[in-house]
Image (cartoon, rainbow, N blue to C red):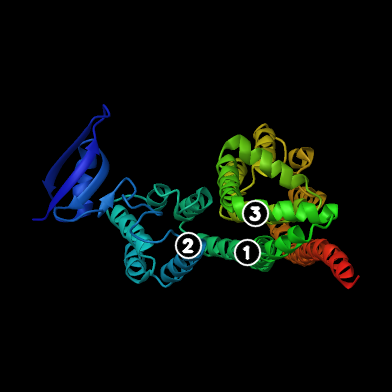
Amino acid sequence: MPVFQYRAKEKNGQTITGQLEAVTIRDAAAKLRADGYIITALTPKGLSNSYSGTKSKAGPLGLGGRRVSLKDLVIFTKQLAVLIRAGLNINTCLRILAEQTENKQFALSIAEIRAEVEGGEAFHVALQRRPKIFSAMYVHMVEAGEASGQLETALERLNATLERDFELRKKVKGALTYPAVIAVVATVAVFILMTVVVPTFTQIFEDSGLELPLVTKVLIGTSKFFSQFWYLLLAGLIGLVFGLKFYYNTPQGRLIIEQFLFALAVVGPVIKKVVAARFTRTLATLLDSGVLVTNAMEIVERAVGNTVVAGAINQARISISKGTGIAKPLAETKVFPLMVTQMIAVGEETGELSTMLNNVADFYEKEAGFAIEGLTSLIEPLVIVIMGIVVGIVVAAIAFPMFDLNSGAAL
């Protein structure tokens, strides 16, 4: 009979380890639970990670493979929904997906989830143990699908939501890639001008003994600083990037930075439209899956991805828990566009809230796309104009003394 190694907690919280014989891992888990133990790890002897109540040591970001991306999750959700719709049980579906998933780290996580489900754990509970892969929205929708016997329907809705989120993110990244490349090329070009081109003329001007214009003196001083202390500039730039990243990862820093971006005349409207689309789509998907409004708002608060909006949702959620509707407390926060709260109010009055939310999400996903394209079309010429101004100043600063030098030589 197979032997299984286990690690579990007793009722008093003390951790114990041991071995036991059982026909299957499910039987082994059942024996341990019957004895009152809380299982934290259960594996066939000689193997590892077959059943675990904790994440694998490598983790979703571990060295054993690349991180689990949104694209990986979209593919997994879509394939799982198709397999369940075809009549296969969840264990068979997970085995198939673990074998064919290209991301090895994700494949390991799927195999662990399958082992936990075989051991008698609910599917959503196994997902909940991996918050870096499966969000609260994902877990709650799966839980609602399991409870209603409509898991494939819940997964299909999840897939539709994840696909839209993936397309929106791809659109944002794609739109910002070209301006970012232009900015990098412009920065490199300016650096080459200041460290290679300008020093060539500096020596000529110093040998001539001419009284140089102020703009030329400033240019020469800047060029010397770039040439002599370029490593300080590089270190400062790297320090600034990592400093901002560290500050953004703190609760207060993230709030302040996102409030600043939210208030910008050009960037703010784009962020509002993207967040409005994500909020309405996620809330509609949760409500369609049978999640209670208060629970759905709590999940959306964590899933919306913006501290300013999350704070507004939290305020609205507190009001909703006291018996008010959704539209009024959201409108009072003055964070969401007026159309969002008005459409929600209509949905509440007509009993078609999820339909209205989906309509609003469709509208703002398109609006967000247009806004991103507009922002891109603004950034590109702005970078080019700034580059042109810098080059123009450099050319003028060099041309003026060169003209005086040539005039003196002609005399």
Task: Using the rendered view, name the quadrant where residue 171 is placed.
Answer: bottom right
Q: Where is residue 356 in the image (x, y as percent from the top left)?
A: 73, 57
Disc 3/disc 1 C-alpha distance (Å): 32 Å
Mark 3 and 2 residues: CB-CB less than 8 Å, in contact? no
Which of the marked residues, 1 or 2, is nearer the chain's N terminus? 2
In the displayed orientation, state which residue is furthest to the left: 1
Q: Residue at x 86, y 63 (%)?
A: 400
Q: Where is residue 315 in the image (x, y as percent from the top left)?
A: 68, 35
Mark 3 and 1 residues: CB-CB less than 8 Å, in contact? no
Residue hosting label 1: 173
Disc 3/disc 2 C-alpha distance (Å): 46 Å
Q: Where is residue 7 in the image (x, y as percent from the top left)?
A: 21, 41
Inspect the image, locate mark 3, and give the three-letter code of the amino acid beneath it: Phe
Classify residue 396 as left or right of residue 49. Answer: right
Residue 380 visible in rendering: yes
The dot on residue 384 is none
In the displayed orientation, state which residue is furthest to the front: 411
Q: Nearer the viewer, mark 1 or mark 2?
A: 1
Task: Using the rendered view, name the quadrant where residue 23 is placed.
Answer: bottom left
Classify residue 281 as left or right of residue 88. Answer: right
Residue hosting label 2: 73
- Answer few, some or many: residues within 10 Å of disc 2's Cα (few below 14, many 20 plus, some between 14 and 19): some
